[in-house]
Image (spheres, rainbow, N blue to C red):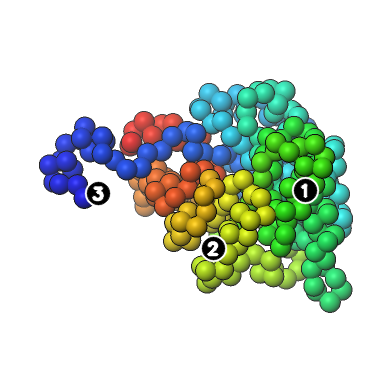
Amino acid sequence: MILPTRLRKNPAIRDLVRETHLAMTDFVYPLFLVDGEGIKREIGSLKNQYHFSIDMLEEEIKDLKAKGVRYVLLFGVPDEKDAEATPAFSDDGVVQRGVRKIKEIDPDMYVICDVCLCEHKSDGHCCFFEENGDIKREKTLDTLCKTAVSQARAGADMVAPSDMMDGHIAAMRKALDEAGFESIPIMGYSAKFASTFYGPFRDAANSAPAFGDRRAYQMDPANGVEALKEVALDVEEGADIVMVKPAMPYLDVLTRATEISYLPMAAYQVSGEFAMIQNAVDNGLLDERAIYESLLCIKRAGAGIIITYFAKDMPELIAKYQ
């Protein structure tokens, strides 16, 4: 579609023929849950984002609902971690307690749980290692599956494995089905790159690796074709939604992935993207419209689901700029 000048000049017609629109149903809002009581603590590297203890969730969930946010993605940051990632799959884990509390506050809030080990494991890695540095794949998959089942048992509406282990979608689908959770969908972090844009998140989740890095199991930012193969594998293994993460630096991958997958496509506007835009707006380097534009471009590139820390800002920005 090429718009004649007479259509561009008239705002009413321009709105009528606009190809891409944002709506509150596009957005998923991340929440960070911590142990303890009476905690609502701003995360230093993520403005207006907080650590919440379970008893402090009620006001936040009601505020999200009032703003039209219908979907949340939970990350747990336990006080005590261990080498076996036990807090990840404990029925009394901070994520599991958070799910139950949110469903008590608002049964209609759609709760997605991140499935990974790095936030719960003492070395900050998403997997277990052999002494020679090889990944213990079977043990890792078993622990991830136990985590997903425990989250589903707590009342999660969806699980989202972010670990990037080979075969994890198929293993998790089998484990959920065998536990009686056939209706729980899986959103795979299908093309998750070993990106430097995760810095503020690692601060928020206290999940920086204690040694090495995650390039052995996350994707090389140079590899676009490999990313498409990873998406195709997740589709084949039974994912219900596939994802590209980060979003804006990888819009080319996002667009190409929508061309090979019939599944709904998600994109995660990660902490580094959020921090850069928010800091630029706060310092007058960019207008607040940059927030709206960044999300519009992610949707235009092919994402029907956008995980973003800006979700609560969007009702006002959509009203002003759409």
- Number of residues whose C-alpha sits closer than 10 Å to that of mark 1, classed few (under 14), some (14–19) or many (20 or more): some
- Residue found 57% across the figure and 39% down from its top: 29
- Residue found 63% across the figure and 32% down from its top: 110
- Number of residues whose C-alpha sits closer than 10 Å to that of mark 2, classed few (under 14), some (14–19) or many (20 or more): many
- In this view, the mark in front (3 or 1): 1
Front residue of 133/277: it is 133
Mark 1 residue element? helix
Q: In the rendering, at what x and y percent does residue 255 appear? A: 44, 56
In the rendered image, which quarter is residue 111 located in?
A: top right
Can you see residue 77?
no
Q: Disc 2 versus disc 1: distance between alpha carbons? A: 24 Å
In the rendered image, which quarter is residue 252 located in?
A: bottom left
Quick one: which residue is furthest to the left in this view? Answer: 6
Q: Which residue is mark 2?
A: 228
Q: In the rendering, at what x and y percent does residue 220 appear? A: 58, 70
**Residue 23 marker:** none
* Disc 3 + disc 2, Cβ < 8 Å: no
**Residue 1 marker:** 3
Q: Disc 3 versus disc 1: distance between alpha carbons? A: 44 Å
